[in-house]
Image (cartoon, helix red, strand yellow):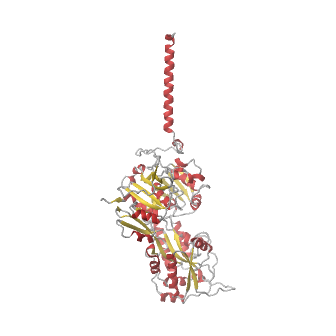
Amino acid sequence: MWKALRWPLLALLFAIMLLTAALYTQLASDDTNNDSSDETPISSLPQITPSPTLEIVEPTAIPTVEIEPGETLPKPVPGQLTEALVGRISKINPLYAEFNPVDRDITSLIFEGLTTINQYGEVVPDLAERWEVSKDGLEYIVAIRRDVLWQDGIPFTSADVRYTIDAIRDPDFQGNASLAEFWKTVEVAVIDDYTMRFRLVQPLASFPEQLRMGIVPFHVLQDYPVKDLHKHPFNLTNPIGTGPYQVESLLSIVGKGEIAGISLRVAPTYRQRPEGQTGYSIDRIVFYTYDTIDQAIAAYVQGEVNSIGQIDTDKLASLRGLPHLAVYNTTLPAVGVLIYNWNRDGIRYVRDQRLRQAFAYGIDRIGAVQRTLGIKAIPANSPLIPGSWAHDPNAVYPSPDVNAANALLNTVSFESPSIPEPTPTETGAEPTPETSPPDATPSATPEPSATPEPVRRSFTILVFDDPALTALAQDLAAQWAVLNFTVTVEPVDRTTLRQRLEDGDFDTAIVEFNFAPYADPDPYTFWHVGQAEDGQNYGAMRDLRLSELLQQARRETVGINRVYLYKEFQRLFVERAPALTLYYPVYSYVTDDRLENVQVGFITTPADRFRTLQDWTWAAE
């Protein structure tokens, strides 16, 4: 009987063995393909064939390393830079990093945009390979590079760009509202995996710089609600970019769970790209965060860090005498200006160009800035930022001359001039030669008044309540007193200053116009007559020719033509003196002087100090 059953039993046993082997193979395959993160399966992405020259790098987990409070931090070592930042790490995501300088510094090394800027502030390709502009300036066709991988090895494509823009303009986006409003006006189309089309509602020469925003990965974030995107673990524990550095580990304080720093390493995926195959001898960057600049300075003095990301110039004295100290200075993308309120009852005489020229002749601006601001700022002649491709160093104010100032004042009537009827320019329309002749001055037409304003040769300078800026305002007031003007200085807190400016509740004011985070020199929002209501033309300045130049420059896509238009704008700004430019604030970066090839030139934010990081290296001991 057993002999009769022997072959059927053997066949059944063999079948069971085959079934077991098949099940084991399926389980092993499932385990290999199972991803414990929230990432979307690769199969759901657009079908993309990676370049055969690229190596797919497996993503690695980011550990958190605990450090004891008071633990000695690493001394300078070859291949590593240890830097102090003031503030706390919050979100390592370019969509939310704009308002936190610490996040902005770190994300600038991990993420990239389609474009970037060079040392002159010119926009150049980054993740984009090139772009073309239509003749009417409304359409941009952007070709995307094909040799870029995300740091987890997935190819970068137009799907990532589209996702980033869609997230920004989503109604539930929790980031910069003005950024969202801009992108809602742009029509975005994906032509293929490596080509995109952007269509604008009106020509905007600075549009390529809008493409500098960091791109985030579609395949990681696509299924997460935009309203909760600012809470995604991606923002801290597993940020994945395309940039030169990736997160190696987070540093926390034992027992507190508080993030105290972060360590970055050069990304293997970036090393495969042409620009990553040479340089980057600084293989690791460790950022330690401190609550105050004094704590950061103490860490530098004790040799715990090699550099300080940004330091107030008045704190530099505390580092004097230290060995191996190097301080790199440049100007921040801002300009301090004294503006006039052209609508203010009693001082509408500021509309008279001769009076404003007299005010320019009557003060030593350079001396006032040097006496009061010292190394915190440098004197400014132009309303555009120095170092920019558009800045004209030859546009300078005349030398101080009290006699010339008095001669001009003798020709000025201090009766209140009229408010001209609105022109197409003032209502936001593009000016034309007919409505805006080159030599037009808005104060030329007198206004009959039933109740004339009293003649007044006194006014107030509104200023932020900072000792140095208050001293600057007082210095200017003292110089104008020589011209028989009674000038008082009114320092106020920052909130009050902003509100008074927006309400037009001032005679004159010292204002700091900030271009950050953009490199484009367009000052349209500060000086165009159409920006008196919704922009930052707080004094309702109405020079039609200047407005015409700004309108043309922001629409002109040919670079050489824009250079000419901005050069003419700066020349006329000095000649007509609609306001008085005073100073550019200074940015200072402190490092060990054995760190070579550091260059801090034109910047839009302090994060731009890393532009030449590829060339930085430690000197051989």
* Residue 199, position as x, y percentages in the image: 56, 58
Residue 103 or residue 434, whichever sits in front: 103
* Residue 307, position as x, y percentages in the image: 40, 62
Q: Is residue 531 above or below residue 153?
A: below
Res 136 quadrant in image: bottom right
Looking at the image, the residue that sits furthest to the right is: 450
Residue 156 or residue 424, whichever sits in front: 156
Looking at the image, the residue that sits furthest to the left is: 621
Residue 16 or residue 130, whichever sits in front: 16
Q: Is residue 333 above or below residue 255?
A: below
Total numbered circles: 0
Residue 560 or residue 532, whichever sits in front: 532
* Residue 409, position as x, y percentages in the image: 54, 88
Q: Residue at x 32, y 60 (%)?
A: 619
Left/right placement of residue 598 relative to residue 495 reads left
Q: Is residue 521 above or below residue 356?
A: above
Q: Is residue 42 above or below residue 280?
A: above
Q: Residue at x 45, y 83 (%)?
A: 399
Q: Would you say residue 143 is visible in this rendering? A: yes
Q: Which quarter of the rendered picture does the C terminus lie within?
A: bottom left
Q: Would you say residue 599 is visible in this rendering? A: no
Left/right placement of residue 590 relative to residue 435 reads left
* Residue 566, position as x, y percentages in the image: 49, 71
